[in-house]
Image (spheres, rainbow, N blue to C red):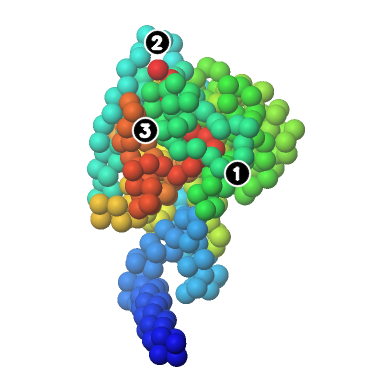
Amino acid sequence: MKKVLKNILKVLSFIGVFILMIVFTLYASLLLICYGPSKSARNIFTTTFLETGAFKFVVHLVLPNKTINEIVNSNSLKELNKDVDSNLIDVSNENKKDIKIEKVNGSNFHGTMMIISDPSRVKVATTAPFSEYGKTLDEIVKENDAIGGVNGGIYVSTLNKGGYPMGVVVSKGEIVWNSPNGVGYHLIGFDENNILKILPLQGLDKNGVEKLVKEEKIRDAVTFQEEASDANNHFVKLIINGEKRESNGLGSGANPRTAIGQKADGTVLLLVTDGRGASGHLGATASDLIEVMEKYGAVNAANLDGGSSSTMYYEDKYLMTSVTLYYSNSSWRLPEAFIIEK
């Protein structure tokens, strides 16, 4: 018995030493990235990890808050204080029904663009009444008898439970989630005239949200966040009224992305890209999204929730799956999504 225990202790000791060696190697690698000769490597590491849901803390293990803030401020998007001008969008042609799927390639990402000619087909579907666990994108699409969809707004993604949204969610003209008290929250979605709106929620309480949704006649919308700090590096507006958002330095980190845009004729653009090592790619930056959306003729465009949540489903199959290995044939659980009706 003593011999068995001794052998077990030896094995455990070996495993412990092995784990310590891995941790030491990883930490040393992070120090090399952050304090080595390449400032660009340090900057992309910092901005990229601050955009993740679960690994923001890694940056704080190796860099002080002051340095993190300096990096974010010098590698973020500049302000674009403009509201969407609805007069620039003409959705009068109601006979457009086609959907096109096109591959999009960048220097450090692959992506898929879904082009929906009829904006009235793009809706927000939810799992309401919300509970601890959400549903995968294919489940949401099928349960709503839709033809396709992409992930939508920010939500509580801890442990991939995905049951609860964050911010504000509007579906079929009804506010189904109203919690606007987050830094830099923006409402992103469509009004009753099928025009894409990107509206700041800063300073609004629940009553203020109800008033905004009523005045703007919002029919379907989700929330994402604009925040550049040592806590987050998120952004929303990409193009407003044809004006591209300018950037400082890198503009953002590189990650899987989901973005939405609208052309002058009302056509909706839904873009999903890979990243985080998928196919050897880091991911798309804010500048990449702006470039792609401009190329496809977007008058207005916004960034949605990305990272492991970024997925696209169309005609009974995933065109873009989660970059998380365990969910590489599916999506994370979600409380809501943009869907395209048949």
Within the image, what quadrant is residue 242 found in?
top left
- Amino acid type, residue under disc 2 in the picture: Asn
Q: Secondary structure at mark 3?
A: strand
What label does residue 220 carry, if any? none
- Within 10 Å of disc 2 (Cα), the crowding (few <14, some 14-19, many 20+) is few
Marked residue nearer the N-terminal end (2 or 1): 2
- Seen in the picture, residue 70 relative to 140 is either above or below; the reply is below
Name which residue lies at 47% across and 74% down: 62
User: Who is closer to the viewer here, 134 or 179?
Assistant: 134
Marked residue nearer the N-terminal end (3 or 2): 2
Marked residue nearer the N-terminal end (1 or 3): 1
Residue under label 2: 93
Image coords of residue 76 (percent x, y) = 46, 54
Label 1 – label 3 distance at C-alpha: 23 Å
Residue 106 visible to the viewer: yes
Name which residue lies at 37% across and 41% down: 330
Residue under label 3: 313
Residue under label 1: 132
Camera-nearest label, 1 or 3: 1
- Amino acid type, residue under disc 3 in the picture: Tyr
Q: Secondary structure at mark 1?
A: loop
